[in-house]
Image (cartoon, grey):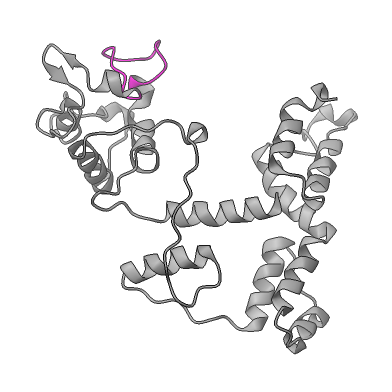
Amino acid sequence: MKTRIHLLLVIVFFVSSLSAKEGEISYNRDIRPILSNHCFSCHGLDEEHRKAKLRLDVREEAIMSRDGIQAIAPESIEDSESWMRIISDDEDDVMPPPETHKSLTSEEKKLVKQWIEEGAPYEGHWAFSTPKKAEVPKVNGTKNPIDAFIQDRLKKEGLTVSPSAEKETLLRRVYLDLTGLPPTLEELDAFITDQSPNAWEKVIDDLMNRIAYGEHMARFWLDLARYADTHGLHLDNERSMWLYRDWVVKAFNQNLPFDEFTRWQLAGDLLP
């Protein structure tokens, strides 16, 4: 689980930082968030609050012709009523309506326009899509596949790799990343004087085998799960949720596989 989570964080950060260019529009990455923030509340799944009987979250309905009018006409901006509403200056026609206090930024409009011109392709939810292994770019001087992707992108953008950080800086970064604590002076001196080729690997192995590693990593998960040791009120007479907190810490420290980690939280009381 340790490797998967760190790799996932790096990939998510890297992918989310990419700006869409010609031919690189992704519905899930670029378009769905725009429609979700500005359109789905009135033109989405909720039938009770749906306006004009129009759904934009389902492609078949979004491109459907209604009396000769299409909300989204693939490859045709001029025939896409939703686009004409987005760029309209008429308060009675513009979408989203003025009373919502929402409007698309110029960059968001550019993305939507490009998406429609490219055929307005939709994508299923990422969780139900089979992962595709990307071909690692051939870049000289890289130590791992992630560096290859990053350096390949930097080259395309006309950028260069930043110089290597000093050993003191590297050590502080990895300590804070993995345990949330800075290194001691003794630990810093030991790393600086260690000239072995695997000095860095030894530091990482040591940190990931510390109890503090699980405690630090568990914080991020527990925050997402809305965990708290207290209600902050009179309901604190009996508190037993700390068992879950300690279990999450233990799961990280024991490197519990992510699928098992998830399964136990969803159905732990039903497992043998």
Query: Does residue 47 belong to the magenta stretch?
Result: yes
- The answer to whether 118 appears left or right of 175 in the picture is left
Above or below 92: residue 246: below
Kindly tell me whether residue 182 is visible in this rendering: no
Judge whether 126 appears above or below 268 on screen. below
Quarter of the image with the C terminus in it:
top right
Residue 76 quadrant: top left
Q: Position of residue 167 (x, y in %)?
A: 65, 82
Labels in figure, total: 0
Q: Main secondary structure of the magenta part?
A: loop
Q: Is residue 72 visible?
A: yes
- Residue 89: quarter of image: top left
Q: Residue at x 38, y 23 (%)?
A: 41
| Residue 77 in magenta stretch | no
Q: Tell me the magenta residue range.
A: 43-57
Drawn side of residue 183 relative to residue 152, left or right: right
Q: Residue at x 78, y 85 (%)?
A: 189
Residue 223, position as x, y percentages in the image? 68, 43
Image: 8 above or below 198: above
For the residue pair 96 and 212, the one nearer the viewer reads as 212
Q: Residue at x 86, y 37 (%)?
A: 243
Q: Position of residue 259 (x, y in %)?
A: 69, 38
User: With 139 as the anchor, is 145 left or right in this view?
Assistant: right
Residue that appears at 82% across and 27% down = 235
